[in-house]
Image (cartoon, rainbow, N blue to C red):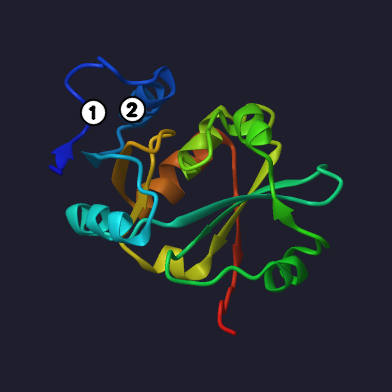
Amino acid sequence: MVLYDGRPENDEGRLEREMRTYDYLDELGIKYQRTDHEPADNMEACNKIDAVLGVIICKNLFLCNRQKTNFYLLMMPGDKKFKTKELSKQINSARLSFAEAEDMLKYLDIEPGAVSIMGLMNDKNKEVKLLIDEDVLKDEYIGCHPCVCTSSLKIKTEDIVEKFLPSVGHEATIVHLVGED
């Protein structure tokens, strides 16, 4: 794996949603670094990607309530355990569960394995609520996917919070997850 500055030189073999992500970041003047890789399906593969980027990629979970009336994108450190009960209390939403793949496509134009804050640029009706664990905001950089699971980005946290989120019309709810047994 190689670390590149910015977008790929050409779009051959790349999905339109990935290229749209680079276009959007470039339009906002957000600098990013990128690495291309096979889909990461285990922690060892994720650790290799993290090492190339020099950052720990966030765990991104797409959640919903039982009635499927509220959808949430949760960003949390990859090494924390997720406990629905802990989060449910903080956002006053009982019975949180993982949303279906069809809902990921419908709201974020993302498929399982590629869930990322970048998908919020596709949430035109602002139907997904963004939740960020406070520890994610302590790092200088955020690692995330550009709406596909075969590339990963390193972006300044400040650029995500101050440029990207306002441009997509989303505000983050900051949560405190302990993630311990």
Few, some or many C-alpha atoms within 10 Å of disc 2 (few <14, some 14-19, many ≥20)?
Answer: many
Secondary-structure class at tag 1: loop
31 w.r.t. 178: above or below:
above
Question: How many numbered marks are there?
Answer: 2
What is the quadrant of the C terminus in the image? bottom right
The residue at 73%/71% (across/down) is 85
Which one is in front, 44 or 50?
A: 44
Residue at image mark 2: 22
Is there CB contact under 8 Å for labels 2 and 1? yes
The residue at 31%/47% (across/down) is 155
Q: Name which of mark 2 and mark 1 comes first in the sequence.
A: 1
Q: Residue furthest bottom?
A: 181
| Image location of residue 91, percent across then percent down | 74, 63
| Image location of residue 118, percent across then percent down | 46, 38
| Image location of residue 22, percent across then percent down | 33, 27
Instruction: Give the alpha-carbon distance from disc 2 to disc 1, as whole Å.
Output: 6 Å
Q: Residue furthest right?
A: 67
39 w.r.t. 27: above or below:
below
Secondary-structure class at tag 2: helix
| Image location of residue 173, percent across then percent down | 63, 58
Numbered badge on residue 74: none
Which one is in front, 3 or 101?
A: 101
The residue at 51%/35% (across/down) is 119
Task: Check disc 1 and give the amino acid type.
Answer: Arg
Task: Check disc 2 and give the amino acid type.
Answer: Tyr
162 w.r.t. 180: above or below:
above
48 w.r.t. 36: above or below:
below
The residue at 58%/33% (across/down) is 108
What is the quadrant of the N terminus in the image? top left
Few, some or many C-alpha atoms within 10 Å of disc 1 (few <14, some 14-19, many ≥20)?
Answer: many
Numbered badge on residue 7: 1
68 left or right of 123 in image: right
